[in-house]
Image (cartoon, rainbow, N blue to C red):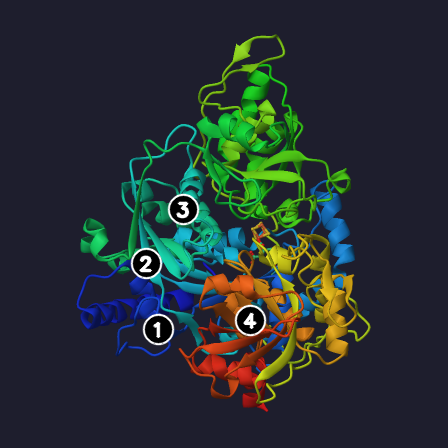
Amino acid sequence: MAFDIEVIKSVYERMPERVNAARQLLGKPLTLTEKILYSHLWENPATQTFGRGADYVDFAPDRVAMQDATAQMALLQFMQAGRPKVAVPSTVHCDHLITAKVGATADLAVANDESKEVYDFLASVSNKYGIGFWKPGAGIIHQVVLENYAFPGGMMIGTDSHTVNAGGLGMIAIGVGGADACDVMAGLPWELKWPKLIGVKLTGKLSGWCSAKDVILKVAGILTVKGGTGCIVEYFGEGATSMSCTGKGTICNMGAEIGATTSTFGYDESMERYLRATGRADVADLANGVKEHLTADAEVYANPEQYFDQIIEIDLNTLEPYLNGPFTPDLATPISKMKEEAAKNGWPTKVEVGLIGSCTNSSYEDISRAVSLAKQVSEKNLKPKADYLITPGSEQVRFTIERDGFLDIFDQIGAKVFTNACGPCIGMWDRMGAEKQEKNTIVHSFNRNFAKRADGNPNTFAFVASPELVTALAIAGDLTFNPLTDSLTNENGEAVMLDAPSGFELPAKGFAVEDAGYQAPAEDGSAVQVAVSPTSNRLQLLDPFQAWEGTDLTNLRLLIKAKGKCTTDHISMAGPWLKFRGHLDNISDNLLIGAINFFNEKANEVVNQETGKSDTVPATQRAYKAAGIGSIVVGDENYGEGSSREHAAMEPRHLGVRAVLVKSFARIHETNLKKQGMLALTFADKADYDKIQEADKIDIVGLTSFAPDKSLTLVLNHADGSKDEITVNHSYNDQQIEWFKAGGALNIIRKSVA
Ligand code: MIC
Ligand code: SF4
């Protein structure tokens, strides 16, 4: 039986009535996205329609998922909310803190030892508050959610940007910061700006070297890392229904890389097959009962241009395999053009390592297709040229592929299997020699490839591709090898071609697992004690942030004017810093250390305006804090793209930064800043970015009449005595202004229980 089947039942019971009411209210056929959103309104039935990209709306999600690196902060906040138990089914997944070095068993033992304090904390908080706990080694959050919890037509939030993966099973699943998760677990509504809708029509059918990954790699090339901001992407068409459910998951997963709020697909037979194969025939039966509500109305897909804000059409018959990168997931190059592009850009073409797996691409189908290539190594007497590493997405997949002999085949090509965890995808890869910072190329089937992300080496050029293409390129050891047209020379000196990959959507003998790694919470957790040692360097109870002082902010220093890409990896780096995710003061020592200072083009070097000396960003900000001086951070486009980690908002808040002013924000980061009581501002005129000088003293004027849709003014007092006044915008609504005034949303929840 599926987990929380009663919740699923009640969602399906109320769905027809709510969907019909929404259709009547809107007076038009509905997209799937609208059906799910309207049936999850906090206040139902709907009495008004909502403006896309305009109205903030309260929702009631069905569940919450958290991974260990973000759950610590989410649960430290929840502990202050004064609730005895979570209000909706919630789970914690231990996947981000395991270093990949030697191999699965040894690495897991090291993590269990090193992070014992954190795992014990998460296990006991989960036990106390009724949260399901997935132990280290159980798998990566999104794979485990897809296998166990996701259901068509449901709505969930998760403290990880790739929560969107569950769209593969027809959900609206959205990545959020821990403070948002805390609200929902405390039984409060969850707020989101009503999204715009992008429709992607898939015609034709995948075949040969192409896989679902190539669809999203192509979409990323079209929409870029910010093209999906504020939008939900709905996929449909014969190409969608002919694709596996896990392939759909891959596409939705990487929707995070285009900034989309989420992506989804209508319920179809591939989803039904997946539900049944993963032990959830009960969910499939229930879903079949409300089928017509779990996909868009027929008129919508017949005339999509009338119902979506933007339409993209992709013909799967003519799609090519893509390689996206380096350093950004939207730099899309079809494999046939790689030779030319690599030469033009000076990308190193020798592939050192191929990595498959991650939350994006570790389904049974993915692995079986990669295996079909690995098999050809011995059949064709080839010798793989690059190292090959595998991180399975869950113990269930790992156990099943071991049973089916796939791991033995990988073993024959010298592959190393790491723990079922994030590992190299989040910098938890102890790669030999990375500290030498040599220029090198890797290819992986993950989703992100920002600088330093996999191994901490800024000179590692990482390219994202399907597991099949990664395997082929690892065998060839050459980034420019096009398996569709090129041959390889085998050990006998013969030219051989690789046959196109083939695989199985689902295991013929069914999935199997001995110990999936799940721990159910206590029925009554009230007696469970949660201990946080005051001397711990991994965990720290939170002190409330101070409320707004009630005046305009004056005399702020410019901490840094960040140039170019500034992702959450630049603002709050992962890898070695992950160990401080439960300790706000310690992790604040990584504040913006990856951001490039506009004035000297260097990372982690700014001028302390009080001393005139150069120093690191965190040290400079700590000095301002000690002197009681506020500061401001300035950034470029799509500031804060990437992760949901709220540390990127809490660290500056904790160290006394008062405002972040940028050309544009990524959605989750902007909300995280607001939630933590920070000012998140955008230039009314993007060219004003150029007016910000290094030694400016800055005033923010208009806060005493801070109101929705009303701009604020920034006064830049330049060092030479001249002044510039610029207009800055914000997207705060009344509620969010209250968060700012209270010094953070949590202060309001806290007050409501006190
Ligand atoms: C990521 O892929 O960047 C992460 C690590 O999973 C993050 C979450 C985190 O920073 O803990 C995400 O995607 O939200
Ligand atoms: Fe983990 Fe990477 Fe997936 Fe993030 S993207 S959840 S780090 S596997």
At horizontal 63% and vertical 54% (from top left) the residue drawn is 95
At horizontal 64% and vertical 56% (from top left) the residue drawn is 595
Location of residue 579 with respect to 656 vertically, above or below: above
* Residue 596 shown left or right of residue 158 in the figure: right
| Label 2 Cα crowd, 10 Å radius (few <14 / some 14-19 / many 20+) | many
In the rendered image, the quadrant that contains the N terminus is bottom left
Q: Which mark is residue 248?
A: 3
Disc 3 or 2, which lies upstream in sequence? 2
Disc 1 or 4, which lies upstream in sequence? 1
Question: Where's residue 51, x and y in %?
Answer: 30, 70
What's under tag 4, amino acid-wise? Leu
Pointer 4 residue Cβ closer than 8 Å to ligand 1: no
Q: Which mark is residue 197?
A: 2
State the residue position of label 1.
Answer: 55
| Label 1 Cα crowd, 10 Å radius (few <14 / some 14-19 / many 20+) | some
In the rendered image, the quadrant that contains the C terminus is bottom right
Nearest-to-viewer mark from 2 and 4: 4
Location of residue 390 with respect to 45 vertically, above or below: above
State the residue position of label 4.
Answer: 673
Q: Secondary structure at mark 1?
A: loop
Pointer 1 residue Cβ closer than 8 Å to ligand 1: no
Question: Where's residue 543, x and y in %?
Answer: 69, 80
